[in-house]
Image (tube, rainbow, N blue to C red):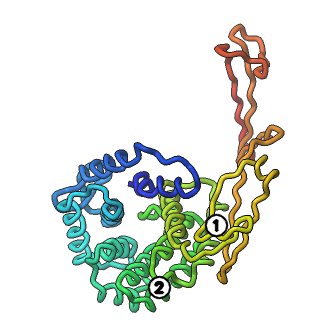
Amino acid sequence: TSRAMPLLYVNDMAKSIGMESDPDLHQRIQDAIYKVLSYQSSSGSFGLWGPGSGDLWLDAYVSEFLTRAREEKYDVPALAMNQALNNLQNSLGYDQDVQDKGSDIAYALYVLARNKKASIGDLRYYADTQLEAFSSPMAVAQLAASLALYGDTQRSESTFQTALRLAQSETDYDWYRSDYGSRLRDGAAILALAAESKPVPSIMPQLIKLVGVARADARWTSTQDESWMLLAARALKEGNDSITLSVNGAPHSGGYSDQVAGGDLVDSPLTIANTGATPLQAVVTAVAAPVDPLPAGGDGFTIDRTYYKLDGTEANVTEAKQNERYVVVLKIYEQN
């Protein structure tokens, strides 16, 4: 599901930045939907490797994927969808331990709200009296997004601000989180949920900065991180209609993105100006091959490589020819 969720929007995102779309993607996603449904039990719950139960967070995550897939006009059988949503409602009926299951409860409420099946009374109760018991920034943001879906703008705004403060207080990665979360995942999820909400909350600039810093600090990313970053990018793109720009002197409405070769940019510089009243953030990504080889690197260790021909004599691999075989001896040293 973590791989399939962002694929729902990949082609649209690729098209918006001038990349080619994948003609086989629609079928891949449809196949993923059917495979996920093969893991659904008769009660509507899901398992990781087959029909299962007992993991409300997983049930909510899969149900969100199915919800988004149905919104994008994929074939999601009504019976399976209804069973998934009924399972979430039934689980919330007897599992109200916010202290230990806050992430699960908030996710289930959000998916139900997205399907117009949540209780607005429950949402307001959790936002007004139990918010401090939710330890996950993403969970708090899901409550905020749920309130926005029911038109409770004031509570939604306040709850999003709480989610931001909680995310800003996160530091190290917690390897034991049952919701597969990280500082980057939580920030991207809050950003995606906030950008999808109407009206968009006032904390968007802080959220964008938070995610940018978290991504720069991340030494590696999980499928959850990548999935929610794409959902955030897609939600931000959908909200760009009010942007007005000047591109090389010509008026332009909406966000702007392009791929330009370095040589073309030298010959024809690109000038972009914000002609609207709202401050905007511009991001430039440069991709190039280094002029000189990069120095050897390592984190806590060094590696020596020696190359030999098959007759045992040392070889110079810079002179290697196609189909020649070599023996590589690696020596790895720990740095204390």
- Badge 2 crowding class, 10 Å Cα cut-off, few under 14, some 14 to 19, many 20 or more, is many
Q: Position of residue 256 (x, y in %)?
A: 62, 64
In which quadrant of the rendered view does residue 53 lie? bottom left
Q: Is mark 2 on a helix, strand or loop?
A: helix
Please say if 258 is above or below 20: below
Three-letter code for the amino acid on which mark 2 is drawn:
Thr
In which quadrant of the rendered view does residue 180 lie? bottom left
Reading the chain from its start, which is encountered first: label 2 or label 1? 2
Please say if 124 is above or below 64: below
Q: Where is residue 178 in the image (x, y as percent from the top left)?
A: 41, 63
| Residue 5 falls left or right of residue 36 | right
Three-letter code for the amino acid on which mark 1 is drawn:
Gly
* In front of the other: 304 or 275: 275
Residue that label 2 marks: 159
Residue that label 1 marks: 212
| Residue 308 falls left or right of residue 10 | right
Taking the spot 45% from the left edge, 78% from the top edge, the residue there is 197
Q: Position of residue 118 (x, y in %)?
A: 28, 79
* In front of the other: 91 or 209: 209
Taking the spot 42% from the left edge, 44% from the top edge, the residue there is 23
